[in-house]
Image (cartoon, rainbow, N blue to C red):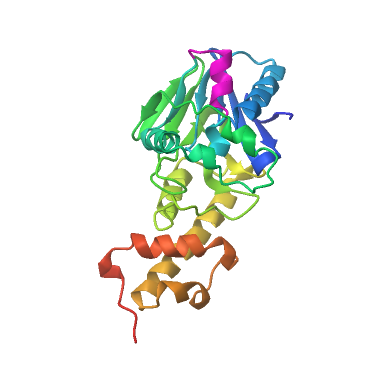
Amino acid sequence: MTFTEVGDRVWVARYEWFDANVSVVAGERGLVVVDTHASTAAGRRVLDDVRHLGAGDVVAVVNTHAHLDHCFGNAAFREADPAVPVHAHEQALAELRDFADSGRQATYAGEPADPRDEEVRSTEIVLPDHTFSSAAVLDLGDRVLELVHPGPAHTSGDLVVLVPDARVLIAGDLVEESAPPAFGPDSFPMQWPLSLDIVLGLTTGASTVVPGHGAVVDREFVEVQRNELGIVAETIRDLAGRGVPVDEALAAGTWPWEERYLATAVRLGYEHLPRSQKRLPLI
């Protein structure tokens, strides 16, 4: 896969499997790789592609969150350099540790016929060893990277990577271009719009934003997606406040995306709302 430069010494490669983006940021002290793809084997391919850039050695890895398509390639980078630090939010570490300890890796929830099922199952989960709670800085000598946790959204442990001098923000799955945002069972649909407000505060009209999946976008795209997420949250709040039962909410609401993308969001939204904002269904 070819890396494309999207800002000064910031490259992105879009991998077909999971339609996942991997980013590389260069400084005088070396390269930072943001996300490592979905298995050890996939991580090795990413590392080969990074080496073909000829831009330097990898000095750090960042995981934007704990989902396998963003961090299961960590082991490949540790094979190449046992001392390479892996950075993540502290909650992402907790989620990934729970995943490893529970043995869920052995029951990878892919399609039964997925040809890469065994590739994922055999992957060694390498946990992040450098974590933070709100924000952290990576010093590359001639530039710094800012790691920011904007709050729970796609997961409880999301982070974004800001490259201020290049006007690039790497958003992980807080932003998705190739499909609507993914509401998994560990997502926070009522808080996601607020997290994107913080992300927007880190950008300007001249910013380039790298989503977790799909093509690179601009600030206007993020504004639109934030507003769509806001519609989802406020529609859930309105329906629950009017006493519409959760199992009728999808049919009763007007949504920005097809209902098949929103069943989990509605269920979680009802669960996460405080009792004061919910009315008992009318009989």
Q: Quadrant of residue 19?
A: top right
At horizontal 50% and vertical 74% (from top left) the residue drawn is 253
The x, y position of residue 111, in whole percent, is 64, 49
The answer to whether residue 77 is magenta is yes
Q: Is residue 38 visible?
A: no
Magenta span dominant secondary structure: helix
> Which residues, given as a range, are shown in magenta?
73-83
Answer above or below: position of 242 versus 45.
below
At horizontal 63% and vertical 49% (from top left) the residue drawn is 177
The x, y position of residue 109, in whole percent, is 56, 46
Of residues 257 and 121, the one drawn nearer to the viewer in this rendering: 121
Q: How many marks?
A: 0
Q: Is residue 71 visible?
A: yes
At horizontal 60% and vertical 31% (from top left) the residue drawn is 39
At horizontal 34% and vertical 74% (from top left) the residue drawn is 241
Of residues 10 and 204, the one drawn nearer to the viewer in this rendering: 10
Of residues 139 and 13, the one drawn nearer to the viewer in this rendering: 13
The answer to whether residue 4 is magenta is no
The x, y position of residue 182, in whole percent, is 54, 52
Q: Quadrant of residue 275?
A: bottom left
Most distant residue in the right direction: 2
